[in-house]
Amino acid sequence: MLNFFKKKQIDPREQMKAVLGDYELPSFPVIVMNALEKVRDTEASNSEISELVATDPGLSVRLLTTVNSAAYALKHKVNNIDHAVSLMGRGELESILISMAVHEVMPVENTPVFNAQRFWGAAAHRAALARELADLIDPSSRSESFTAALLQDMAIPILALQRADDYGPVLERWYANGVDLATLERETFGWDHATVAMWMCDNWGFPDRIAEAIGAHHGTGDDELVPLPAVSLVSCLREQEEVAGVEQLVDDAFENYNLPRDQVMDLVDTSFAGAKDMARMFG
């Protein structure tokens, strides 16, 4: 269980059941679970990790495609799994594996107000920009910021399908008016998608730092929940347009972190361009 829930004496599974009823989160693919176990094993060698990943051609291709996407902005192309593992390090590899696993088990069905391709497109843009912003604010959080930004709204597809009757209208209002989604959710239900996503993080065994960044990306008022600045900044970007919310993000980056507006706009342009191939892969 995540340390945050232990301290608060909260059972996230019971909380999730109260919101989603009998719905059960799907399990990650076995190959990804095995790879994550190897990555987290301090006695496992890099070659053992790469050999395991290489046994699944689909996982290998997705991993190399993600690493070589323009969103990662690597200077040289990574041609094999050995190179990817040694270049990225275990923390980065763990983040990418988690991202791919979540995408693979997420619902793909569309509803009248939810579109999976649009959702993952926006998620890719947030992730790419968060990675660049983290370089300026806190470089040590670069990989976690990428993953937490990509997955910060991962509860929305499930809520849109499992609670279409009452959650759908809230989602539609967010798309139409651009109001803060978390505020709407709290006013309507007493919980928000960030909280539900953190319950999911606990279920799937996410690292605490990524889970807390996802749970805190809209702010909670709880000082024990540690946000990642870049993840919180990109949370204002909305799905319906690539540019929706950019002006607010630029203002927030300047006011909270003294980042020049022109510099942030340049990052928006370059990261959004770099996210296109990753958006196609996830979408």
Image (tube, rainbow, N blue to C red):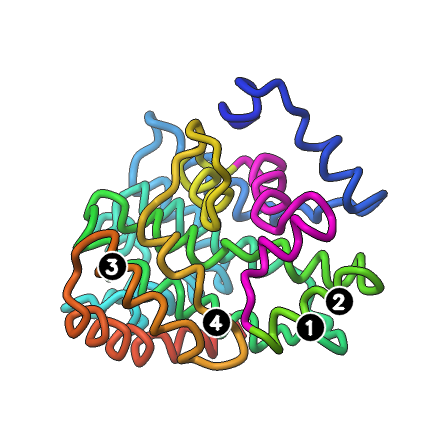
Whole-Å distance between the Cαs marked 4 and 3?
A: 16 Å
User: In this picture, is 199 found above or below 11?
Assistant: below
Indicate the secondary structure of the residue bearing disc 3: helix
Left/right placement of residue 134 relative to residue 64 reads left
Q: Can residue 131 be seen in this view?
A: yes
* Magenta run includes residue 193: yes
Left/right placement of residue 232 relative to residue 199 reads left
Along the viewing direction, whichever of 218 and 275 lies nearer the viewer:
218
Residue 100 screen position, x and y as percent: 49, 57
Q: Give the range drawn in magenta.
A: 178-205
Label 1 or label 3, whichever lies nearer to me, is 1
Residue at 65 percent across and 76 percent down: it is 115
Mark 1 or mark 4, which is nearer the start of the sequence?
Answer: 4
Which corner quadrant of the image does residue 74 belong to? bottom left
Callouts 1 and 3 close, C-beta under 8 Å: no
Q: Which amino acid does label 4 sit on?
A: Ala
Left/right placement of residue 86 relative to residue 209 reads left
- Label 2, on which residue? 168
Q: What residue type is labelled 3?
A: Leu
Whole-Å distance between the Cαs marked 4 and 1?
A: 16 Å
Residue 116 screen position, x and y as percent: 62, 73
Residue at 84 percent across and 44 percent down: it is 21
